[in-house]
Image (spheres, rainbow, N blue to C red):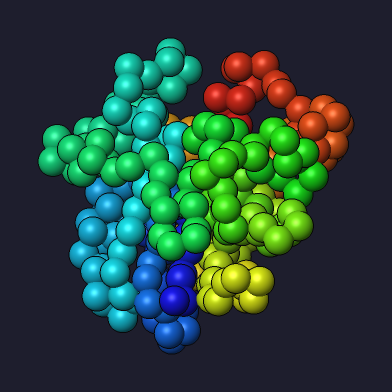
């Protein structure tokens, strides 16, 4: 089975449309959406509607999970998130929020375990050098598919694999083009292609302003630069991932 994996769409409709257009020509049997679907972007409702309309549309069956920002929309928000969460909730409405609430936190597709952050938590990211003991799980037999970090990666741990297709909305690896992954094979012969496509970023940036999206200054920086606003050195924390920051900084940056 050939899987197309996308994640971290964050309501960036035009980036999603570009990724799907590219993926339709790649012969995928299933589209897997690994969370963070709608929040923090200018078109949350349209993005969710598009995802829910795709089943059989040149991409095979569609399977989705929720990510941590989807979960935030279903919880009582922390003070620093309240304005942004309420903005997105108003645009989604009750029926779309119900659809988000019905999504699982993880799913298994054959020997692929799909999570948002890691098997430990939806906001625990796996970076290239995160020690395996920090995210290992008996549920991970062969292939672990994840998102959350906005950085594309294919990592091998013995006979097992970790695959992150990057982010549709705003990659944070220095390349602003949306990313996704194609997976095929298995049982020691997994083939992974990490793809990048381009789209009209100016259109999304204009919509951030037109729709007065809360936190749009940070999102604009992400889309334009594909980088964190604060300098973060991988491995500085001794965990192979960017160091923890104060809660206010994390909220401002929108780091998942």
Left/right of residue 241 with respect to residue 194 in the rendered view:
right
Q: In the image shown, does 190 or 130 lie closer to the viewer?
A: 190
Q: In the image shown, does 21 or 124 lie closer to the viewer?
A: 124
Q: Position of residue 110 (x, y in %)?
A: 43, 62
Tell me: residue 109, above or below residue 60: above
Q: In the image shown, does 236 or 219 lie closer to the viewer?
A: 236
- Residue, far top: 79
Q: Position of residue 117 (x, y in %)?
A: 55, 40
Query: Residue at point 29% right, 60% down?
Result: 51
Query: Residue at point 50% right, 70% down?
Result: 199
Residue 94 visible to the viewer? yes
Q: Quadrant of the N terminus?
A: bottom left
Quadrant housing residue 176: bottom right
Q: Position of residue 151 (x, y in %)?
A: 65, 53
Quadrant housing residue 82: top left
Tell me: residue 212, above or below residue 110: above
Residue 210 visible to the viewer? no
Q: Quadrant of the C terminus?
A: top right
Tell me: residue 189, above or below residue 244: below
Query: Residue at point 29% right, 69% down?
Result: 61
Left/right of residue 114 with respect to residue 135 in the rendered view:
left
Query: Residue at point 43% right, 35% down?
Result: 69
Q: Position of residue 192 (x, y in %)?
A: 62, 72
């Amino acid at each position: 089975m050939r899987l197309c994996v996308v994640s971290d769409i964050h309501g960036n409709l035009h980036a999603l449309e570009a990724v799907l257009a590219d993926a339709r020509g790649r012969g995928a049997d299933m589209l897997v959406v690994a969370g963070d679907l709608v929040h923090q972007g200018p078109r949350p409702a349209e993005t969710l509607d598009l995802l829910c309309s795709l089943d059989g549309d040149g991409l095979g069956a569609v399977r989705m999970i929720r990510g941590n920002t989807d979960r935030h929309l279903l919880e009582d928000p922390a003070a620093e998130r309240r304005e942004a969460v309420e903005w997105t909730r108003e645009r989604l409405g009750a029926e779309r929020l119900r659809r988000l609430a019905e999504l699982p936190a993880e799913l298994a597709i054959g020997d692929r375990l799909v999570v948002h952050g890691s098997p430990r938590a939806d906001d625990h990211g796996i970076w290239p050098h995160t020690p395996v003991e920090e995210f290992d799980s008996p549920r991970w037999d062969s292939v672990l598919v994840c998102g959350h970090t906005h950085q594309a990666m294919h990592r091998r741990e013995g006979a097992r694999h970790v695959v992150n297709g990057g982010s549709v909305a705003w990659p944070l690896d220095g390349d602003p083009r949306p990313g996704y992954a194609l997976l095929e094979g298995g049982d020691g012969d997994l083939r992974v292609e990490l793809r990048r496509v381009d789209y009209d970023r100016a259109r999304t940036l204009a919509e951030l302003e037109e729709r007065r999206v809360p936190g749009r200054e940070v999102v604009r920086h992400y889309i334009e630069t594909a980088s964190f606003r604060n300098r973060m050195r991988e491995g500085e924390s001794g965990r192979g991932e960017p160091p923890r920051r104060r809660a206010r900084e994390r909220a401002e940056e929108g780091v998942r």
